[in-house]
Amino acid sequence: MYTQIQNINLDETLIEQLLKAKDYLTDNNIVAFPTETVYGLGANGLSEEAVAKIFEAKGRPQDNPLILHISSLEMLKDLAICNDDVFKLAKEFWPGPLTLVLPKKENVPLAVTAGLETVAIRMPSHPIALKLIELCNFPLAAPSANRSGRPSPTSARMVYHDLRTLIPLILDGGACDIGLESTVLDLSSPTPKILRPGQISPQQIQPFLANLADYQGLPKSKRPSAPGMKYKHYKPNVKIILLKDLNKIEDLLTKEDSLKPAFIGLNNPKSKNDSLKKLIFQNPGDLAKNLYSLFFKLEQSLFDLIIIEDIQDKEIGLALMNRILKAADRIVE
Ligand code: TXA
Ligand code: MG
């Protein structure tokens, strides 16, 4: 299958530019599009035939449910059972990077929810995503537009790398603003809990939900402990080490004997190693925005080691450390 990349400009012709994507989606085909978090791989979320194509293109396990992306609260009401908390959170955080898991209504296919009686829903704020859903007038089921197990794409180029020949169209809206996937908040049981941290932090959600469970972090079983015991997720084909003490970088570089090492962090580590490529960011938000695209670029340029600085796990740092821990082969204290 030929994969077209269509450049989209945010101007008064936006609707005309999106008509081709709308036609594809209406015909049960899949289209990749930008959101404020990462690129999504969209299909008509009410069509089992269309949703099946997402699982096939991604190589995604059938038991991993999808998020439905909506453009209005009317759509929400058709898809899920909502209480007052839902509308309060929607008013505060939508459109934006918050996904709510809610009891589903009948018209949501079980193919979307992987057989669950709950459905994940989010209203994205990216103008291309929002306008596309509005034009389609049906919810778009959309996981991140990567092959299963790879880092989420934050540019059209990354989508193309993973999914070329597998999908007909990629809408190119430039780099994603946030760069990490949305916060997933489960409201389907009596005690709401965060299933995946994102830019919207537990502290921001807490005032709206008195009984929000404390965020527990990654389960022990999914943290890297010994070499080789990695949780395969968000992972480029490069060895990744989380370094807790930057003073130990020289020591680490000697031991690892890497030919092409890179460092990603907020502070400039002291190292005499000339081959070390340093990628230093002003703040955790900038690092988050660039993390996946750096994974991609470093992999493409055949780096053989990425050392990442330990970052304080508050605000966006919580989401950042969650992704870094999942990608890391090893932690060096
Ligand atoms: O920012 C995002 O959320 C991006 C953009 C494209 O919107 N999407 C995204 O989708 O990250 P995906 O499929 O890569 O991740 C969705 C997460 C998965 O961890 C999935 O297991 C969880 O949401 N999820 C979906 N439906 C669920 C449900 N009913 N109950 C619990 N978790 C659910
Ligand atoms: Mg994903």
Image (tube, grey):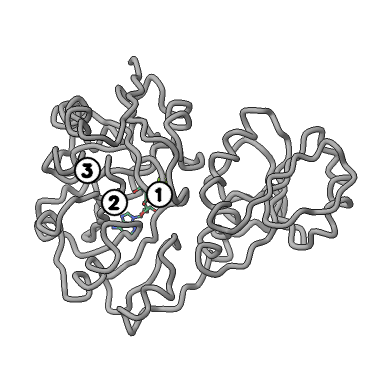
Mark 1: amino acid: Thr
- Horizontal side of 48 relative to 11 (left or right) equals left
Label at residue 37: 1
Disc nearest the viewer among 3 and 1: 1
Residue 22 locus on image (x, y percent): 17, 31
Circle 2 residue: 124
Viewer-proximal residue among 281 and 133: 281
Residue 80 locus on image (x, y percent): 15, 61
Q: Earlier in the sequence, mark 3 or mark 1?
A: 1
Single out the residue that lies furthest toward the front. Answer: 12
Residue under the image location 32 percent in, 67 percent down: 186
Q: Are marks 1 and 2 in contact (CB under 8 Å)?
A: yes
Circle 3 residue: 140
Q: Quadrant of the N terminus?
A: top left
Rounded to the nearest angstrom, the CA distance separating label 3 from label 1 is 16 Å
Viewer-proximal residue among 267 and 122: 267
Residue under the image location 17 percent in, 76 percent down: 84
Viewer-proximal residue among 175 and 260: 175
Q: Earlier in the sequence, mark 1 or mark 2?
A: 1
Rounded to the nearest angstrom, the CA distance separating label 1 from label 2 is 8 Å
Residue under the image location 45 percent in, 63 percent down: 197
Question: SS for tag 2?
Answer: loop
Question: SS for tag 1?
Answer: loop
Residue 288 locus on image (x, y percent): 54, 52
Q: Quadrant of the C terminus?
A: bottom right
The answer to whether mark 2 is within 8 Å of ligand 1 is yes
The answer to whether mark 1 is within 8 Å of ligand 1 is yes
Question: SS for tag 3?
Answer: strand
Q: Are marks 2 and 3 in contact (CB under 8 Å)?
A: no
Mark 2: amino acid: Pro
Q: Residues within 10 Å of mark 1 (few under 14, many from 20)?
A: many
